[in-house]
Every structure is written in C-alpha cells, then in structure tokens.
Image: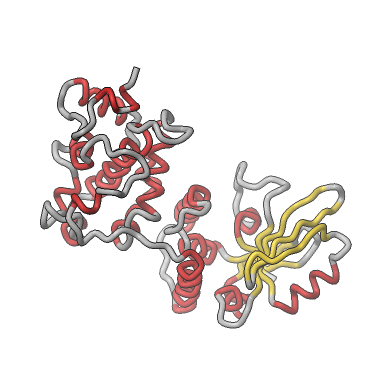
C-alpha cells in the first residue's frame, strides 16, 4: 500500500494548517491488499462503496473519530499499479495509516508529478495548484528520469480520459471567439476592456498576435517577451475575464470580492479557457500571477468608464450595466 496526497506530505514536511485529524487518507492498494484490508479492518468500516471502476470511498471509525479513505486500486496498466510495482523506487519512507496499516510514503518528486498531471482540470484546482507550487519551492528544478516520465504520462492520460475536457479553438477571428462564449450579457467589447487593463499602454497579447483579426497568438513571439511581460499577459487576461464574467454583470455570489473574481478567472486560464503552451505557462507561474495581483484593477476600469475612455457596446447603455446601476 502507498499513501499519497496531504497525509503523505505530512510525513516529510511541516504543513501548518494543511492537515487536520479529519483529513482524508488517499491510499493506493493492489486488489489483494484491498481484500485483506477489508477483512482485517471490517469492524472499523462504517461504509464502503465504489466511485469508479478502480476507486472506492470508505468511511472508518476508530476511538470515536471518523475519517474518510479514498482508495485507488492498482489495476493492470494503471498509473497506480505502476507505482505499486516500483514501490521501493518511488517511495521515500514508511508510515502508518489511521487504522495502523503499514504504508509506503510516496516521495516528494512523485507527489509533485501526481499534482501536475491533473492541474489542467478545475476540480480542486486551488488546493492542487497551491500544493504543486509548494512542492516546487521545496524541490526546485530536478531532472526527470525515464520512470518519472513514464509515470507522469500514464497519470496525465488517465486524467484526460476521466475528464474529457474541451477547450475553445483559437484559429478563429476574435469576433467569433468572443461571441456567444459568456453565460452573461457581453456589455463591453472584450478587447476594449483589455485596453483598460494594459500594463504598458497596449495589451500584452497584441505583442504576440501575428494577425490582430485572429484570436491565435504566437508561441515564439510570447517567449521573446520579458518574463515580467509574460506574467503580465496572463494577468491582463485574468483581469479582463474577471470584469467581463463576474464584476461588470454582477454575476455570482462573490462578484464584489475582486480578488476572488481574479482568482476564478486565473483558474479558467489554467484549465478550461485555452490549452497548450499558454495554459502551461499560466500554471507554472500561477504563484507569480497571484503575488503581482493589482487590487486596483476594478477601480481602474470604473475610472476609465467615468472618464469616457470606454463605453458599453450597442445596444447597451451604461444604465443597463449592473455594475453601474444605482
């Protein structure tokens, strides 16, 4: 058996506030180990049911405390079986579970690869991206051997099969890309909002756009920008999406928590809004995009409107815009 996730991290690192006595136990077991575990600890198991073909949720109680086990079975050909078959190489040490089980503790490098393998999906994104960057800060850059690369590909492909996520196409006109993409009325032209959020006079995305009429941007042009400009490019997109989707239409319970709106927009950039190299850059530099957050971005937009630098697009009038009503 191998334990992964937050419980595994606590065996090797000090994680203030990340783990409580009720934190789940994420455990990988072979089918044989799973059957033995059920038999040995059946008096502690409150409930046990399948979540998918190789995943089970168990609620166990011991000494008056109830916790949850997320059990992943190492079926043939799966990434979990891959780890079990290489337990001596991928585990850093040994620990014990809530019920006293002896568990291999997945090494920090393999935990980082596990986190990264599914970061392009929005489920539990905030916790996963926080854990990922925490591990990056601890480990720094490290070379990935063939075993690591093979494991990562298996885990990544499993996540892709499980989530079946689609992202918008970028090889279309900007008009087609930004039309009918919102769950709320589109009160302002997307590119006009971008102009108000520009760090350097013009939006950063225009510096990597070979054809201004197309939504597609050039990877080479992007990586020719300075690192600061690259992060600002991600930020400008997040500011614009936060305004367009949440703040201007006053959409959602936290539409006036501008930092929360920004984080939700940044999450979309890292997951469902786009794919490929730009999404990867946003994930790898998510911590910097948060660190450099400008708490005045919404004020800058409102000020731009009051100064007449930007106006609602037809057929909307300013009195139609929820942010400016009353």
Residue at x 29%, y 57% (from the top left corner): 278
Vertical order, 238 against 107 (above or below): above
Q: Closest to the observer: 201 or 102?
A: 201
Which percent across, then down, holds residue 40?
85, 69
Which percent across, then down, holds residue 265?
37, 44
Quadrant (top left, top right, bottom left, bottom right) of the N terminus: bottom right
Residue at x 29%, y 61% (from the top left corner): 277
User: In the image, 223: left or right of 46?
Assistant: left
Quadrant (top left, top right, bottom left, bottom right) of the C terminus: top left
Which percent across, then down, holds residue 226?
20, 50
Q: Is residue 39 visible?
A: yes
Residue at x 37%, y 46% (from the top left corner): 266
Q: Closest to the observer: 187 or 290?
A: 187
Vertical order, 266 against 274 (above or below): above
Which percent across, then down, holds residue 271?
40, 55
For residue 101, what is the image quadrant? bottom right
Residue at x 34%, y 27% (from the top left corner): 322
Which residue is outermost to the bottom? 76
**What colour-coding does the image apply?**
secondary structure
Q: Closest to the observer: 298 or 185?
A: 185
Q: Closest to the observer: 142 or 226?
A: 226
């Amino acid at each position: 058996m191998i334990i992964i996730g937050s419980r595994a991290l606590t065996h090797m690192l000090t994680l203030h506030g990340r783990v409580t006595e009720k934190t789940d136990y994420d455990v990988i077991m072979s089918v044989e180990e799973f059957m033995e575990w059920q038999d040995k600890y059946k008096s502690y198991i409150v409930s046990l049911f399948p979540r998918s073909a190789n995943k089970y949720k168990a609620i166990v109680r011991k000494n008056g405390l109830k916790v949850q086990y997320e059990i992943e079975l190492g079926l043939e050909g799966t990434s979990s079986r891959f780890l079990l078959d290489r337990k001596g190489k991928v585990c850093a040490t040994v620990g014990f579970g809530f019920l006293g089980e002896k568990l291999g503790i997945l090494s920090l490098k393999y935990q980082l690869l596990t986190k990264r393998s599914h970061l392009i999906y929005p489920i539990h994104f905030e916790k996963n991206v926080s854990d990922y960057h925490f591990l990056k800060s601890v480990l720094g850059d490290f070379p990935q051997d063939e075993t690591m690369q093979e494991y990562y590909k298996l885990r990544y492909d499993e996540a892709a099969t499980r989530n079946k996520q689609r992202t918008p196409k970028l090889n279309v006109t900007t008009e087609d890309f930004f039309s009918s993409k919102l769950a709320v009325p589109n009160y302002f032209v997307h590119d006009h909002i971008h102009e108000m959020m520009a760090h350097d006079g013009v939006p950063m995305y225009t510096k990597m756009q070979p054809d201004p009429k197309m939504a597609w941007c050039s990877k080479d042009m992007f990586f020719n920008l300075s690192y600061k400009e690259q992060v600002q490019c991600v930020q400008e997109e997040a500011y614009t999406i936060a305004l367009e989707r949440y703040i201007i239409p006053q959409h959602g319970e936290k539409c006036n928590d501008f930092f929360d709106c920004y984080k939700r927009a940044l999450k979309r950039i890292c997951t469902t809004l786009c794919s490929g190299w730009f999404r990867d850059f946003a994930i790898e530099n998510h911590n910097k995009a948060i660190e450099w957050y400008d708490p005045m971005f919404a004020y800058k937009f409102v000020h731009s409107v009051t100064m007449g630098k930007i106006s609602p697009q037809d057929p909307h009038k300013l009195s139609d815009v929820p942010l400016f009503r009353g």
